[in-house]
Image (tube, rainbow, N blue to C red):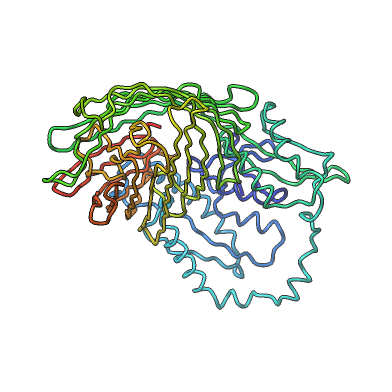
Amino acid sequence: MAADLETGERVVLERGDLTSAMRASMSAPGVFAPVEVDGRLLVDGGIVENLPVDVVKAMGVDIVIAVDVGFRPVARKELTSALAVSNQAVTIMMMRETGRQRSLLAGNDLLITPDLEELQSTDFTATARLIGLGLAATRANAERLARLSLDDDVVAAYTPPRAPVRQGRGGGAFRAHRQAPERYSERIQAELGPVLGQPLDPEEMDERLSHFYGSDNFEALDYRLVRDGALTGIEVSARQKSWGPNFLRFGLELQNDFQGGNSFNAGVRAQVTEVNRFGAEWQTDLQVGANPLFRTGVLPADRVHLELVRRAARSWSSGRTSTSSRAIAALRRYRIDNRELEFDFGREFGSWGELRAGIIRGNGNRHLQVGDPEDPSLPPRTEFERGEFMTRFSVDLLDDAYFPRHGDLFTLQWNGPRESLGADTNADRVSLDWTHAHSWNRNTLILSAAGGAHVSGPTDQVQDYYSLGGLFNLLGAVAGPDQRAAVRDHARNRVPAHRQRPGRPVSTCRPTSAFRSSSATSGIRRGDASVSSALFNGSAFVGFDTFLGPIYVAAGFGEGGDRTFYLLLGRIR
């Protein structure tokens, strides 16, 4: 059962694709996007008929088994927001029609009414509890239901045989695309070309469409089998996003060490999509503050990535453990300016992984800001040339980039500066990063490890050092919020845990969830690579997952009493 969003009419979904019918029937307005079926824009039919007894009786059934899961109006004390008042009004309207439908039930029909207690339709996180209430109500009617059961042989004789449509061939001569803009037709046909004329493999179809959906240009992308005479075809339903296609995203970072030192970064990303008929995207990042950055790049749809310009300025410190505190002291401080041009290409493996290789060419300057310029171990102000090969393998199975609850993330990268590409010297660097998230109930434990090493090459290339410091990266263990520790080689691990506290939706589009967390981090720097030389750090944060992006309020605590406060609003890049 669905409702036509344009006319308000009820729509009985009694034929066609089952998944499309289910998706339309569950499209609660303001929560899930409407679904277009046969030219009609459909949403959840509950808004016009939440208990369609008359539809079932019109099918000629002997006995109706109805389950009334309509919510009840709440007391005045619960009507504390505009959303609560709107939900109350919808509940009252639905109750009137539900009452009329219940009056159509006869004496031999069965009505199951779960006790939903104080729960409301906005309690999206109470799924397990709602299932339990429904199960209890069903079991209370188990004896009556048992009398209505049939033997397997009777069911088999009653159920008509179904043709094995999925075992047929795709029919290369017939392809249909609907709702898809014309500029996507060639790309859709190219993506599905290898499966046409072959036995249908649903897993391969899902993988191909998932890859195409990853372009992030569509609200919905689905397919179904259709017939045209003797041919069986694949009809793709693609609905472009109703927002965009161009986007602006803002972010803000604030950091304070409670000792007079503070820093900030403010940034904006401009994303222009569909810059050509191949679906290329143009992204530009601008950041001002302690770590100014300008970067612009083009990502064509053919999986080749080109960063046209990249300029970055960073302040890095390197030093040794101080006597009063084991934090990294700013004994040597550099300002690094980079200008880079990057060209890479790769292959994606479904929606879980990617292998990418490329070339980076550029130049820059390093400026010694703190330290003795006469010290031969400290490279002074110097220009440098960058020319290197890059290879990266990534696996991303996390369910969320900022507040993961399940899955893994693994990245292995090699950078190889070569004189033949214009670099000052030959070298090899290897880095890896691994994260695993596991949840039970509302609790999540995350295991994380990362490391980087200069396998070969000189030791004074400060611009290629790895950085430590910042949110989730030894926060609180680096002296000074306006800098990062520059280390030639490093290894670190992190064991954060957080507990989710679901909140009511702050909009009709997405609920806001709060997370309380604590974590422990340790890191070892090469040169004194032993457990006794490790830097230990603890942090606690409160995070909010909002429709504007993540919001973090964090505090880091290092050895010797070092403290750092951190605030992040939105996503800078």
State whether residue 508 is above or below residue 119.
above
Residue at image position (35%, 44%) is 489
Q: Which of 28 and 511 is in front in this view?
A: 511
Q: Which residue lies furthest to the front in this view?
A: 376
> Could you tell whether 22 is left or right of 91 in the image?
right
Residue 555, percent from left and from top: 22, 44
Location of the C terminus by quadrant is top left
**Which of the 4 image quarters holds residue 511?**
top left
> Could you tell whether 207 is left or right of 264 in the image?
right
State whether residue 23 is above or below residue 240.
below
Residue at image position (28%, 52%) is 522
State whether residue 503 is above or below residue 363.
below
Residue 145, percent from left and from top: 59, 74
Residue 244 visible within the image: no
Q: Which of 510 and 446 is in front in this view?
A: 446
Residue 206 visible within the image: yes
Q: Which of 489 and 168 is in front in this view?
A: 489
